[in-house]
Image (spheres, rainbow, N blue to C red):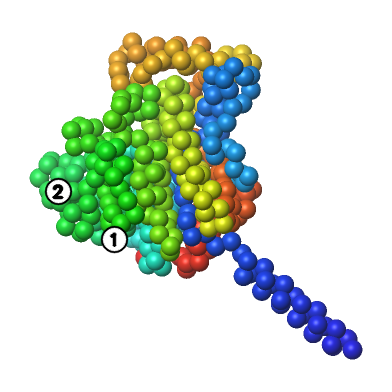
């Protein structure tokens, strides 16, 4: 009798386990948004600014802070608590730590890692890599390339054409013909590999699902290859991160699924400059890009996962300074352009005064070792709550998307 009872319980357990397993979330469409340098203070300041603009004391909201799942992510690299972007992006793309300034290669300088994007692509998912800075920069680069130095921009760029990935987007390439302008043109290499080069907002708007393999960059007349214009400096006709996100969805959407890496790269750049006004506008712009993905999520709620995180914190932003228990975010409205748009000593002093008037302090122009947030919504989002290491994120994405992933070549 006891044996029969045991078998019955075991059978019920198997049925329950099978049911739970078969109903486990399996997202087909995954967005990984990385706000480069975006710490909790950057998000809090932006939300306080939004609230103040609406005449409210307290906290407004950016799109991703409304997600139901939140967590904290450790960001240390293999050789220091304070990571650089390439080491952090290596962890986020391969699930392995490396030393600062290295990309996709182990600290031994021999072992090569492989980004999550490669097994996903082999499994039939379309792949997109997009950013508001150059496509060969540290964060986007780590999702398709390896290099002993993140500064080997041309070497990194040359690896894009051989990936077979479906969508690349950003400002362009830092050295499209090499640092001395004497090497094979990156754009020609991409076209030979079957990519179509599309430029500016007009080109982005014309993309459709049957566009083929696409590289979306700024208008050809734009001299700046390092980044898109800052949101605070933007002029009509400039390519934007929300437009890039919309173009990515148009290009990547298909019944078999996709993975899209989308970086808001200039939150970091503005924070390096201790430019609070530019940080706020970049974070709002990043939030607008996430809204585009949210529109897609609402159409495919059971098949979509959206993650928003950062590679590290930049600037050590402090809300409150000089013993003042206050922040006055509307002081930033006194600044109409980024510091980088006018990099003079007088403008630098002016930006410091704006920060002081807002009661915001920046103890460093570099990165810090603090944890960063992760926000999640959609299929499998509960896997990203609590405390995680940055190496956990690609491993959990791979598991949810049903691919084997070691992070090694």
* Secondary structure type for disc 2: loop
Question: Which sits earlier in the primary sequence, circle 2 or circle 1?
Answer: 1
On the image, which quarter does residue 7 sit in? bottom right
Between residue 242 and residue 341, name the one nearer to us.
242
User: Where residue 117 appears, x then y in whole percent?
Assistant: 39, 58
Which residue is at 46% across, 15% downward?
333
The disc placed on residue 164 is 1
> Dot 2: within a 10 Å radius of its alpha carbon, few (fewer than 14), some, or many (20 or more) residues?
some
Whole-number angstrom distance, CA of label 2 to CA of label 1: 18 Å
User: Where residue 191 appears, x then y in whole percent?
Assistant: 18, 54
Q: Mark yes or no: residue 80 visible.
A: no
- Residue 382 vs residue 363: left or right? right
Which residue is at 38% across, 24% downward?
232
> Dot 1: within a 10 Å radius of its alpha carbon, few (fewer than 14), some, or many (20 or more) residues?
some
User: Where residue 116 appears, x then y in whole percent?
Assistant: 42, 59
User: Pointer 2: what residue?
Assistant: 185
On the image, which quarter does residue 49 sit in? top right
- Residue 341 vs residue 87: left or right? left
Between residue 344 and residue 215, name the one nearer to us.
215
């Amino acid at each position: 009798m006891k044996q029969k009872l045991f078998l019955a319980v075991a059978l019920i357990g198997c049925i329950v386990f099978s049911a739970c397993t078969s109903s486990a979330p399996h997202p087909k469409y995954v967005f990984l948004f990385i706000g480069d340098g975006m710490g909790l203070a950057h998000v809090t300041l932006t939300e306080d600014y939004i609230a103040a603009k609406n005449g409210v004391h307290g906290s407004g909201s950016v799109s991703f802070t409304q997600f139901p799942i939140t967590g904290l992510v450790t960001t240390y690299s293999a050789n220091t608590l304070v990571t650089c972007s390439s080491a952090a992006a290596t962890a986020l793309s391969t699930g392995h730590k490396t030393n600062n300034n290295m990309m996709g290669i182990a600290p031994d300088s021999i072992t090569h890692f492989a980004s999550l994007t490669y097994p996903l692509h082999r499994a039939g998912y379309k792949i997109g890599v997009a950013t508001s800075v150059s496509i060969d920069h540290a964060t986007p680069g780590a999702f398709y390339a390896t290099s002993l130095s993140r500064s080997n921009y041309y070497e990194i760029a040359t690896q894009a054409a051989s990936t077979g990935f479906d969508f690349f987007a950003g400002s362009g390439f830092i050295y499209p013909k090499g640092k001395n302008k004497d090497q094979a043109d990156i754009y020609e290499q991409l076209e030979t590999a079957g990519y179509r080069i599309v430029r500016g907002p007009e080109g982005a708007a014309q993309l459709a699902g049957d566009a083929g393999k696409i590289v979306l960059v700024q208008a050809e007349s734009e001299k700046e290859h390092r980044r898109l214009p800052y949101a605070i400096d933007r002029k009509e006709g400039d390519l934007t991160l929300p437009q890039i996100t919309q173009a990515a969805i148009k290009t990547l959407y298909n019944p078999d699924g996709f993975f899209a890496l989308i970086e808001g790269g200039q939150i970091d750049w503005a924070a390096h400059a201790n430019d609070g006004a530019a940080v706020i506008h970049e974070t709002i712009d990043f939030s607008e890009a996430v809204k585009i993905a949210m529109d897609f999520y609402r159409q495919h709620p059971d098949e979509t996962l959206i993650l928003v995180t950062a590679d590290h914190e930049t600037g050590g932003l402090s809300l409150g300074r000089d013993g003042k228990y206050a922040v006055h975010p509307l002081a930033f409205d006194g600044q109409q352009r980024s510091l980088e748009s006018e990099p003079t000593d007088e403008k630098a002093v002016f930006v410091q005064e704006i920060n002081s008037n807002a009661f915001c302090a920046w103890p460093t122009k570099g990165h810090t070792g603090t944890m960063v947030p992760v926000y999640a919504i959609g299929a499998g989002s509960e896997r990203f709550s609590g405390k995680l290491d940055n190496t956990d994120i690609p491993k959990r994405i791979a598991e949810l998307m049903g691919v084997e992933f070691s992070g090694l070549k």
